Amino acid sequence: MTARRPISPKMQDYLEAVTALAASSGGARVADIARRLGVRMPTVNSALRVLREAGLVAQARYGAVFPTPRGRREGRGIERSHHGLKEFLTLVLGAEERSADAEACRLEHAVSPRTMAAIEAMTSFYASPRGAARLAELRGFLSPRRGGFKRSSRK
């Protein structure tokens, strides 16, 4: 069995869109994918060709697009990472919802499964009653007015 080549972050965005749209509406249409990603339909068709060749989506000629079982697994994994990162950025770091969503979209492609598991565990802890008290303490070290973490006065 040969190793599968990973798809690019841009193709992951298309797979994530197909997975979400297919789950919510019984199939993803090219026009809906284009609207969701802010691209033109010919661009979507080119991306779908790459995803079909990778065995991640299936599409009848001019029909709806569906993720294959493998595509669904990978697409859901990308969605899970996006959601987990967004939750971490908003809950733990106090990022605004809109910027957290955009940042999560960029980060979801670079975070390893091991790191993602640690981020999810940390987010889960800070969402608990015990962690909420610690979160207030952590937030004392963060300062949005200063653009991030407070600098230590120690040298």
Image (tube, grey):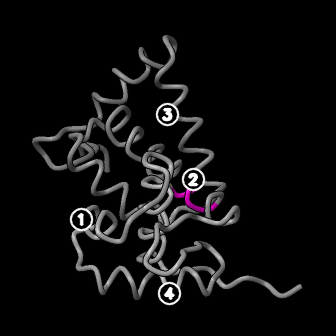
Left or right of 23? Residue 72 is right
Residue 128: where, in percent of width, then height? Answer: 51, 17
User: Residue at the spot x=62%, y=80% of the render?
Assistant: 6
Mark 3 surroundings: few (<14), some (14-19) or many (≥20) residues within 10 A? many
Circles 4 and 3 in contact, beta carbons < 8 Å: no
Which quadrant is the N terminus positioned in?
bottom right
- Judging by the rendered image, the residue that carries numbered circle 4 is 49
Measured Cα–Cα span from mark 4 to mark 3:
37 Å
Residue at the right extreme?
1
Give coordinates of residue 23: x percent, y percent.
50, 48
Kindly identify which residue carries mark 2. 76
Please give the name of the residue rendered at 37% of the width and 54% of the height, measured from the top-left corner: 104
Q: Is residue 13 left or right of residue 53?
A: left
Q: Earlier in the sequence, mark 1 or mark 3?
A: 1
Specify start and end residues of the magenta stretch as a single range.
74-78
Where is residue 150, by image quadrant? top left
Q: Which mark is residue 35?
A: 1
Which of disc 2 and disc 3 is earlier in sequence?
A: 2
Secondary-structure class at tag 1: helix
Q: Quadrant of residue 152?
A: top left
In the displayed structure, 32 sits above or below 128; it is below
Residue at the disc numbered 3: 123
Q: Which of the two discs, 3 and 2, sits closer to the camera?
A: 2
- N-term-proximal mark, 2 vs 1: 1
- Amino acid of disc 3: Thr
Measure how far apart labels 2 and 4 are at the Cα level.
Answer: 20 Å
Q: Earlier in the sequence, mark 4 or mark 3?
A: 4
Is 109 included in the stretch rendered in magenta?
no
Q: Amino acid at mark 2?
A: Arg
Instruction: Say which of 60 and 128 sits in front.
Output: 60
Q: Dots 2 and 1: beta carbons under 8 Å?
A: no
Question: Could you give the CA–CA distance between mark 4 and mark 1, rounded to whole angstroms?
Answer: 18 Å
